[in-house]
Amino acid sequence: MSDAIGLRFAELRRRLDARELRVVDLVEQHLGRIEALADLHAYTLVDADGARAAAAAADRELDAGAHRGPLHGIPIGVKEAWEVEGLPATNGSPAFAGHVAERDATVVARLRAGGAVVLGMQAMSENAIGDLHRDGPGATGRNPRHPDYVSTGSSSGSAAATAAGLAVVSLGSDGGGSVRGPAAAAGVVGLKPTETLLPADGGYAWTFSMSTAGLLAREVAAIEAAFGPLAETAPAAPRSEAPRLAALHPDDLGELAPGIAAAYREALAAYRAAGATIVEAPFVDLASAGPAWFARMRELAHAHELTLLERRARYSEAMRGFLAAAAATPLAEYAASFATADRLRAAVDRVLADVDALLTPATPTPGLRWEEWPSELVFPWYRFCFPFNLTGHPGLTLPWALDPAGLPLAVTLVGRHGTDEALLALGAWCEARGSFDPTPVP
């Protein structure tokens, strides 16, 4: 592994600022690693020339003392759900093949303004909801932790790239767990911000009421570095005092794989040993979110209505079937989903009223095998994710440990609306109480 790629983020930032490491060298190391690990299918397009030019510009600015902040000179990847000027953005779908962005999405422009160097476009599932593919046309990114397991969707390439050291930070999107699920599967940190906090222009329409841009990185510090310019906000001060956390009621946990259950208990015990106060959350009916979330897929069907008419043959059969089912959702069920979301949001807000965050397992099992995608196992695997798309709360997924098969075991912190900076500071506190190795997967 190239030496700079394996650095912790704080040391990487120190070397760049001290000019002991050139951005052009850091970018070349990433480009070489992307080429060497091309069989991960993490990227659909690598903009080597653009990345080299941006790296040279970043070095000139840093040499002149014009420092844009902690993201300056950091190599990032962008899920192809977002537009990057001059590059193809297909939303993981042949239906949008040939589309080349005329400008950056605002979230991409903000990251560039913070000094980020875009390496290229990262693979994803078809239209952020379709099937995953191991190889061939439309390959969606392999899980570098274990070849038999998927990175899950839809930010599959972003998770694979981040875990394998093919980007320091990746820009994804999350409408039902599409950042947090892949982060848990690949063993990286994943942030779903508060809904409506970030602009959505320049991104493919998903569900306007639930989807948001999100970030993946191997450490919370890298997420914080990117979140500042992304949200145009200053980071919270590092947390010094121990937090007050709510743990899920046993009725809310449901059935968990033994490794996941053990990791959840171990994380709670470690935080308690470090001084955190752990309280049991009153029952929150997370299961009620399932039908309501599905009803919102009517918005997705509406977003694809015209394109589906014009380019029906370019959609997979599975995608056409899903959109037809979503379009057939009764309007009454769609309307009722907002009442369900309001009730669930109020219940979660009551839990969060006197704590810093709610801690949940990230997933009920460590991962899903290739042959299990698609299957009836997929949607339940996200049951600790999609309820918080309905409610809009920010969520931060943290890897805790690896099971004997090398699969990540992760937890998620759910924070109050609009407290994303404080949630990241809490995440850094929790991360420091764990022992997960953020080194890129060799």
Image (cartoon, rainbow, N blue to C red):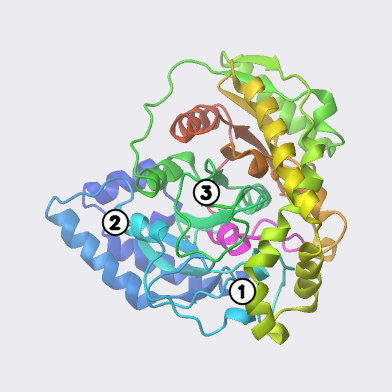
User: Could you tell me residue 309's position as x and y percent?
Assistant: 68, 82
In the rendered image, the vertical position of residue 140 relative to residue 219, given as above or below? below
Q: Is residue 158 magenta?
A: yes
User: Could you tell me residue 166's position as x and y percent?
Assistant: 49, 62
- Residue 340 falls left or right of residue 41: right
User: Could you tell me residue 367's position as x and y percent?
Assistant: 76, 51
**Residue shown at the point (85%, 26%) measured from the top left:** 251
Q: Which region of the structure is painted magenta?
A: 143-161
Quadrant occupied by the C terminus? bottom right
Q: Earlier in the sequence, mark 1 or mark 2?
A: 1
- Residue 356 falls left or right of residue 134: left
Circle 3: element type:
loop
In the picture of the structure, the residue carrying the numbered disc 3 is 439
Q: Residue 395, can we see it? A: yes
In the picture of the structure, the residue carrying the numbered disc 2 is 113
Give the CA separation, mark 1 to mark 2. Answer: 32 Å
In the picture of the structure, the residue carrying the numbered disc 1 is 39
